[in-house]
Amino acid sequence: MAQGFAAACPDTISATALPAPAIPGARAVFAAHIACGNAGGRAEEMLLFVFTGAQDLYTVKWAQRSAPRNAPVLLDPAIWMPRYDALAVTVRLCDPVPGEGPRYPSCG
């Protein structure tokens, strides 16, 4: 994803690796804030979690767009860390239970 941002806004990209949250059921986790100051007339920032399960790779992202800027958009902890905390306690990876449907109560 960072490469896509870099291609869209090579002069205003910023990327900050964040501590990997403990996601239940995930084998490995990576977290980052990636931002583009000006791509197509807008800025975009995202909080990205990438994690692996037994056989698959998953991504969860929280993004926002704003007016374009002529400089990199740096991580604002007051905005993004509460979002990080909200995702970190919400995201989990669970094995399917035969016959169980959406809302998946066993994954509680």
Image (spheres, rainbow, N blue to C red):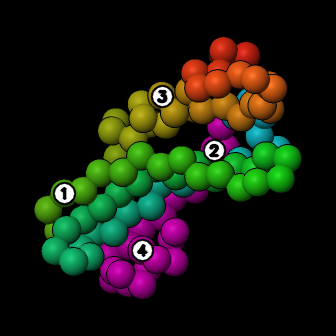
- Amino acid carrying mark 2 in the image: Pro
Query: Residue 66: which disc?
Result: 1
* Dot 3 and dot 2 residues touching (CB under 8 Å): no
Point 19% across, 57% down: residue: 66
Instruction: Answer with mark 4 or mark 1, whichever residue precedes in sequence.
Output: 4
Instruction: Answer with mark 4 or mark 3, whichever residue precedes in sequence.
Output: 4
- Amino acid carrying mark 1 in the image: Ser
Pointer 1: residues within 10 angstroms few (<14), some, or many (20+)?
few
Residue 48: % across, % down: 52, 52
Q: Is residue 82 above or below residue 58?
A: above
Q: Disc 4 marks which residue?
A: 5
- Residue 103 seen in this snapshot: yes
Point 26% across, 76% down: residue: 39
- The magenta segment is 1-21
Query: Residue 19: which disc?
Result: 2
**In which quadrant of the rendered view does residue 56 lie?**
bottom right
- Give the CA separation, mark 3 to mark 1: 22 Å
- Give the CA separation, mark 2 to mark 4: 21 Å
Is 83 displayed left or right of 30 in the figure?
Answer: left
Instruction: Answer with mark 2 or mark 4, whichever residue precedes in sequence.
Output: 4
- Give the CA separation, mark 4 to mark 3: 24 Å
Instruction: Answer with mark 3 or mark 2, whichever residue precedes in sequence.
Output: 2
Q: Is residue 46 magenta?
A: no
Point 67% across, 31% down: residue: 92
Classify mark 2: helix, strand or loop.
Answer: loop
Is 84 displayed left or right of 49 in the figure?
Answer: left
Q: Disc 3 marks which residue?
A: 86
Q: Is residue 2 magenta?
A: yes
